[in-house]
Amino acid sequence: MARKKSTDKEPNRTPAADSGVMGLRAEVVEQPITETLETNYMPYAMSVIISRAIPEIDGFKPSHRKLLYTMYDMGLLTKPRTKSANIVGQTMRLNPHGDAAIYDTMVRLSRGYEALLTPFVDSKGNFGKHYSRDMSWAAPRYTEAKLAPICAELFQDIDKDTVDMVDNYDGSMLEPSLLPTRFPNVLVSANMGIAVGMASQICGFNLAEVCETAIACLKDAKHDLLTTLPAPDFPTGGEILYDTEEMRRIYETGRGSFRVRSRWRYLQKENMIEVYEIPYSTTAEQIMDKVAELMKAGKVREISDMRDETDLSGLKLTIDLKRGTDPEKLMQKLCKLTPLTDSFACNFNILIGGSPKVMGVGEILEEWSAWRTDCVKRRLYFDITRKKEKLHLLKGLAKILLDIDKAIAIIRETEHEADVVPNLMIGFGIDQAQAEYVAEIRLRNINREYILKRVAETEALEAEIAELQDTLDSTRRIRSLIIAELTEVAKKYGQPRKTGIVYTDEVEEYSEDVASEDYPVTVFLSREGYLKKITPQSLRMNSQQKYKENDALARSFESGNRGEILVFTDRAQCYKVRLADFDDTKASALGTYLPTKLGFDEGESVVDVADPGDYSKQLLLFYQNGKVARVELSAYATKTNRRRLTGAVSDKSPLVCVLRLDEETEIAVYTSEGRAVVFHSSALQSKTSRTTQGVGVARMRPKYTVTSAAPLDQTAIKNPARYRVRSLPALGALVRDEDTGNEQLTLTEE
């Protein structure tokens, strides 16, 4: 029979009382939450930050370092491969976190996994692939490994006290606190770690470029990093959508993000697309799943099938297209809607002296150079110490040379072995180390020739010690040694970039293409950069244009809603935009502010707008210095439909205005001196280069510039003969009042 639960309140009952122990009560001890965090949580957090998740200046986490040092200690830098299970077992002497965690670390460092540009483990067998989520690696009993040749640069001179050796977890053996890497591996090897309250995300860079940049920074502290280290490099290839300002911000602060997109090719004969390189931060399965989801939702109807054809030759995702599909537009769509384009977030968080610190690339190289300098100094000091010890022994041997028979007699006449060394010290005035060295000489070497050869080494040793000491005392010489090492590493192990660079201005972003209706519109541009697109019906209702205070009309022309316009700015750039992207407005509205709409650079402003039509005509570009360039509009008709074109005009003089030339006609140019020059457009020779400086039309006096230009039939000039010139450039004539178009106002009395 079940017992009924008592509902009586028993405030004095305790667990002890319930168990039959009378007189005992549980005591609740209050403890502040801050004290709990300090005693329980903080030690754990610090352990994760310092001993697990964040890499140090040598570019390795403790798990990486313990594994590589174990393999080095096993002789796997020169010996043949051994079973991975053997390596994992040996590593547990330093890293007692379980064999699975150790093997996972080995897989990531291996050549077969392809997660690093410069892998440190020469692997044999199935180690999986970084770009595949489902391709798991084989068990350690089936795979083999050894150290890659580049690991010689990690352990060079490690036996010369270049780094501190510390006890392992149980004090049974020593391990290095850092590896004396001869190159900035912290930037070469990609690293990611999640600690407590912080994380680290370091992208990999090309080894040759990093070494070249480190050399340049050692030679010039103000070196511009982007000139030698343009962008990160990934083993999976792809293309970085490059924004110079964002990349510079990452280099300076250590934080930021950039986008990487896939590489693909179109096979026209088979009507299919092959994706052969994908972003480092995604996998083939993620891409396949997302494309399948879009196909199921009916958002991508151009694809008949997609399959993963990855084989021993590498990654390959094949997309079968339906007939009539434009592969360029489809890939633009997929790159926006799937991980075919993905972002890589940077957080260069590194342990410096046991403390985490977020640094830019320049500061990381500076820290590495200082640390590497200390390693080289320790190596030099070690060599000097060893040579001095040898020199000291040889000097003791030289004293024996004075009387070899006496030394033999002392040894022969000494009754006890323990007295040999003290007797030699007394007999020749040498110290214990020298006496030990003499006493250990074999009987066959107790001859004058042997001793003379050893003594002859004294001068060479003294010269070597002096040379090493001079190097140790010279910052310039140490810097030269580091530069020589970096040059050697770059030459021996450097590889071409795998990841391409494409400027964001050259990439057309996919947008939902809503079939826009084509109808006539009139475009109005104000001096301040406001643009209006007004239909004829709206203009008939109200043609009085409204502008901001101190603003006025700068340009107007008729076009179609599906047409494009070219927006020229004062930074020698041109923005291409479709009129359909602008809403229809009324004359009473201010319009759309172009710098905001088109994403101008800070401080950039509109100079003029032109209607390119079908890009078959020509443009006249007028500059303040009086020159005019006649450029083919086809030079602006890019195949990729880029939104922004850099180097759109010459930057030798500020641009004043732009005119589309449909047919040969007379042009009037006005200057700030109040003069005008009228010339025929046929006098200008057409150029295909956008940045051509053109030819001189208006001859400018000091402090004066060209202010405007227009076709003669659109000006108020009534007597054009006064301003026509026979040859160019010309000074022109002063503009008379009747040719300005300004009516004289008079006051009349009523």
Image: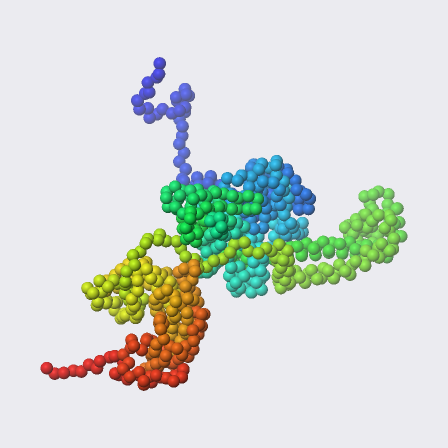
Q: Residue at x 35, y 14 (%)?
A: 1
Report x, y in % for residue 679: 36, 80
> Is residue 586 rendered to the left or right of residue 631?
left
Viewer-proximal residue, 473 or 10? Answer: 473
Vertical placement of residue 558 versus 675, above or below: above
Q: Measuring from the top left, give residue 245's x and y in whole percent.
A: 44, 60
Residue 582, position in %: x, y?
A: 30, 59
Q: Is residue 369 visible?
A: no
Of residues 480 and 583, the one nearer the viewer is: 583
Tell which residue pokes out farthest to the left in this image.
750
Q: Is residue 573 above or below residue 259?
A: below
Quadrant assignment, res 71: top right
The answer to which quarter of the image holds residue 129 is top right
Seen from the viewer's position, the closer of residues 156 and 328 is 328
Q: Residue at x 47, y 48 (%)?
A: 272
State left or right for residue 170 relative to residue 305: right
Q: Is residue 114 left or right of residue 393?
A: left
Q: Determine the residue located farthest toward the top in the rendered image.
A: 1
Q: Residue at x 34, y 66 (%)?
A: 611
What percent of the width, then of the height, locates residue 729? Answer: 40, 82
Quadrant for the C terminus, please: bottom left
> How many numbered marks are there?
0
Residue 307 seen by the camera: yes
> Is residue 548 positioned above or below 305 on the image?
below
Q: Residue at x 63, y 62 (%)?
A: 480
